Image (cartoon, grey):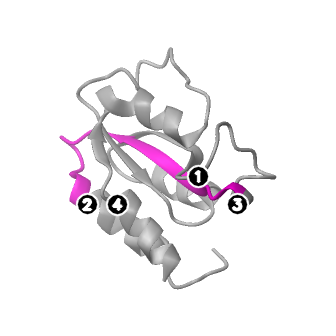
């Protein structure tokens, strides 16, 4: 049940890429800063947590209209979580999906997300 609530929390985060730097900082992952993708105001940004970020990242790299996917951590305590300590500090694995809203609307990204994760699987 907690996992479903965490996923729902991240589903509410559909932002423009102009807000991307702030969102990436909150995940504890270093900014990529110089990326033209992250600075493109015409792109949308969705932050999603679906268990294992490697699987979620891989799935979204194949989605139509997706320009870039960045893995990281979100919603925990402190700064700069690592793969060894993120869970103990309350972070969850998440991805930021930069997408072209002219090619794929946010709702279609969410539909794609739900087809690729199982929110009832506590093991990820």
Q: Which residue is mark 3?
A: 87
Count of labels shown? 4
Assess disc 1: are there few (<14), some (14-19) or many (≥20) residues with their C-alpha within 10 Å of its C-alpha. some
Q: CA distance from mark 1 to mark 2?
A: 28 Å
Question: Helix or strand or loop: what does disc 1 sit on?
Answer: loop
Front-most of 82 and 95?
Answer: 82
**Do tag 2 and tag 4 residues touch (Cβ < 8 Å)?**
no
Query: In this picture, which residue range is highlighted in magenta?
Result: 89-107
Residue 26 image label: none
Residue at horizontal 46 percent and vertical 44 percent from the top: 96
Residue 11 image label: 4
Residue 33 lies, in percent from the top left, at 51, 18
In the image, farthest residue toward the right: 84
Which of the marked residues, 1 or 2, is nearer the chain's N terminus?
1
Which of the marked residues, 4 or 1, is nearer the chain's N terminus?
4
Front-most of 100 and 120?
Answer: 120
Which of the marked residues, 3 or 4, is nearer the chain's N terminus?
4
Q: Which residue is mark 2?
A: 108
Q: CA distance from mark 2 to mark 4?
A: 12 Å
Assess disc 3: are there few (<14), some (14-19) or many (≥20) residues with their C-alpha within 10 Å of its C-alpha. some
Residue 93 visible? The answer is yes
Against 115, residue 108 (above or below) is: above
């Amino acid at each position: 049940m907690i996992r479903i609530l965490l996923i729902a929390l991240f589903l509410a985060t559909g932002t423009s890429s102009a807000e991307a730097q702030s969102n990436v900082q909150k995940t504890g992952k270093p900014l990529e800063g110089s990326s033209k993708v992250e600075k493109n105001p015409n792109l949308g940004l969705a932050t999603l947590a679906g268990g294992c970020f490697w699987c979620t990242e891989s799935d979204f790299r194949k989605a139509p209209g997706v320009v870039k996917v960045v893995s990281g951590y979100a919603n925990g305590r402190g700064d700069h979580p690592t793969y060894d300590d993120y869970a103990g500090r309350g972070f969850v694995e998440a991805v930021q999906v930069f997408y072209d809203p002219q090619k794929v609307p946010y709702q279609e990204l969410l539909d794609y997300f739900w087809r690729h994760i199982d929110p009832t699987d506590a093991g990820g």
